[in-house]
Amino acid sequence: IPIRLADYRPSDHLIDRVALDISLDAHATRVTATLSLRPNPAGRAGADLVLDGEDLTLLSFERDGVALAPDAYTVTDTALILRYPPAEPFTLTIRTQVDPSANTRLMGLYRSNGVYCTQCEADGFRRITYFLDRPDVMAVYTTRIEADREEAPVLLGNGNPIEAGDAGPGRHFAVWHDPHPKPAYLFALVGGRLDRLGGRFTTRDGREVDLGIFVEPGKAERAAYALDAVIRSMAWDETAFGRIYDLDVFNVVAVSDFNMGAMENKGLNIFNDRYVLASPETATDADYAAIEAIIAHEYFHNWSGNRVTCRDWFQLCLKEGLTVFRDQEFSSDMRSRAVHRIGEVRTLRARQFPEDTGPLAHPVRPQQYAEINNFYTATVYEKGAEIVRMLRTLLGPDVFARGMDRYFSECDGTAATVEDFLAAFAAVSGLDLTAFARWYERPGTPVVTVEGEHQAAAGTYTLRFRQDLPSALAQGLGRQPGQEADATPPLVIPVALGLVGPEGVLREAVSDRVHDGVFVLERASDTITFTGVPVAPVASLFRGFSAPVRVAAVATDADRLVLLAHDTDPFNRWQAAQDVAMARLVADARGVDRPMDNAGFVAALATFLDREALSDPAFAALVLTVPSEGDIANTLGQSIDPDAIHRARTDLRRSLGRGLFERLTRLREALADPAGSRFSPDAASAGRRALRNVALDLIAGADPQAGLALAAAQFDAATTMTDRLAALSALALIPGPTRESALSAFAERFAHEPLVLDKWFAIQATIPEADTLDRVRRLQAHPAFAMTNPNRVRSLVGSFSAGNPTQFNRADGAGYDFLAETVIALDPTNPQIAAKLLTGFGSWRMLEPGRQAKAAQSLAAIGARPGLSRDVSDIVGRMQNLG
Ligand code: ARG
Ligand code: ZN
């Protein structure tokens, strides 16, 4: 039975204060919760009090200090119900017991490698005690944690530490108090044997904050980059958004078993250790960048999520989309803005676009859900961030900043909605944002079709725009095929644009519809005219990817190469090169029978490299990267044959590699680290490594023997994980003994580094060869593999299903059977991860008919299993619907 946004009602009761006393024990943890409750004036008078609970053993239940008679309450599998609760404020004392060691779902209180930790978002708190587990019930928490001194010398909670001491033989305790009212999903505790890397930060208003990063014993050195990222995040949020930290301590704890990336619990962020631990030998440049981004993301939630939280889970994008936008801005300021923007868009297109076109498509603010944990999606996060970015583009940076300030001050301490967010911007701008708000409600990636026409005699240029939704979704919205686009109300689409001539940007070209370089497409179709255009220009459209749409515009290679050479917008320069590559890839994959002449493309890339490779290697690396197989599939859109796509991509890699061979070889030498240079994870150094390694990939694509020699040498000599892994990735594509011995050497060298072994599993799972599935099955039996560890499962099974298009989509369906088996095996112990893996089938309707039939069989096999979790049955059901 789905839960609907339209059915939202305020809680009938509120909880003002919570006192928790938690005595940690591996199998029998005792929790005493003392709750100060009162009827909610906005709720229904006299309603039963229904406290949520799951997998709890109730030990005792008192009201105002008196044990309740058994007939005064009811206990079910999901609730503790108090009949006829008082009309006045009252106190409940509830004692429960839980078994953290048996908690394989990793929701609520569990043990990871002997460390007690919690994960409560979205609804895990009810697995710790009975509670009104909904985000609009906000309370002040005091938490006393008690544990064995040996087993858990470190005891952490939300807020500030207020007391600690002995608690009888071998036991000790700590008390934490969080003065900021918060919903239960932000509760956390940690107990364990952990090392601490400490730091300090002084806020703009003079508060001295104690910072701590807690990691497995012996690994504190590897937390240095994360600590540095915390300090930079705190400083940046003060200057960029005026947001100041509000507690005396800020702690981050790294644990090895974690369902997702990290969690923003108040004052006590808990992280998947892969987003904390880094050293040059074990972490790639991409890992460093991800640590920086996720540390920032969780820290920024302190305001966009915690101080202002969500009224209900339909509003998830209110905190997630906004916080992703904020972490993207932070990373852009720390690194290269242009390079970062390209990365954001690549992620959006790789993950969100397919989701938005497939059976799991949903609005950024969903209208209903069966299982909320299945809505932590690329759409809510990444498209949610794009909506905030469009708002800034439409309002301009100054008005946007005033709107943010207003939102934070108006909504501080409340559980807010998307309407509250938009109201703040409407208030400061005086604009009506009703039409803009459609972005939150409308699933599907809009297509914007653009046609340009030059009027030479008049010196004018006309651009005609039309917005539309892909037909399947349009039909889902009640439109008939062929019906005019304006049957659904249009979206408000900011189009950042400019005109470029053969010598460069045409600055004299102006249109009264374009302000600060932005035209706002608000109607189903519209036309704008530029004057001051003596020569036929090329339109540079959606600069910086100003809206999350697909653009359909007719352009020649020559047009695109003009943009690559002359546009001022780096995003569109990159896009132009991608478009030239994509046109070739699509034609090749479709088997269009025409000789592919890449000479002009190669020459343009050569000129580009000669001019810019050494001044901006990170950008050059992106320009040289051939679109992924996933990108090609998304562009083709239907009747996908992954083998044809793989062949097309291999062909283009070979051709570009051949055409640029000498240059790439010289570039690798020019970009080599000077002898004795020290590793630095900064963006400029990472950019040089990136370009060296893209060059290696193209060289190997052109000449596998030359590639093999270079990669083997780099593999042996590497001093960084970035270089070693790039070499291994190149070798992985070249079958033979060199590859196998490199893989063994890697496994041996990093045998005691689980996060590095994840990379080793992943690389093997993505080899595009027929025996990879056998290899993956063998690796499932490897001693370092464990179905109980989400990182291992993602690295082996997730990499196979999401990162190996030819082998996962084997024509015989064996890849699908394997995924189905794994999902079924994992579902009873960790349904959240099982459901996530299952989304590997998300694009199955795009496949050619033979593979579709096989995928449908596997989905049906999963769907037919008795006793599926709500997580998995929700996904499998939606996957099979909408045809
Ligand atoms: N709020 C966390 C973050 O984005 C993620 C929590 C995900 N929770 C879940 N149940 N899937 O920072
Ligand atoms: Zn988040």
Image (cartoon, helix red, strand yellow):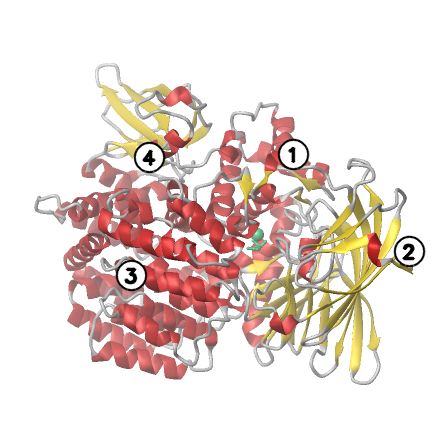
Left or right for 538, reference 31:
left
First in sequence, mark 1 or 3: give its number. 1
Label 4 packing within 10 angstroms: few (<14), some (14-19), many (20+) = some
Measured Cα–Cα span from mark 1 to mark 2: 37 Å
Q: Position of residue 173 (x, y in %)?
A: 80, 74
Measured Cα–Cα span from mark 1 to mark 3: 46 Å
Left or right for 301, reference 755:
right
Residue bearing mark 1: 420
Q: Secondary structure at mark 1?
A: helix
Question: Is 680 or 497 nearer to us in this picture?
Answer: 497
Residue bearing mark 2: 64
272 lies above or below 546: below
Q: Position of residue 81 (x, y in %)?
A: 76, 51
Q: Kindly identify the amino acid type of the residue bearing the numbered disc 1.
A: Asp
Q: Are marks 4 and 2 in contact (CB under 8 Å)?
A: no
Q: Are marks 1 and 3 in contact (CB under 8 Å)?
A: no
Residue at 27%, 50% in the rendered image: 853
Residue bearing mark 4: 551
857 lies above or below 256: above
Question: Which tag is nearer the camera, tag 1 or tag 2?
Answer: 2
Q: Position of residue 611 (x, y in %)?
A: 27, 51
Measured Cα–Cα span from mark 4 to mark 3: 27 Å
- Which quadrant holds the C terminus? top left
Residue bearing mark 3: 694
Residue 517 in sight here: no
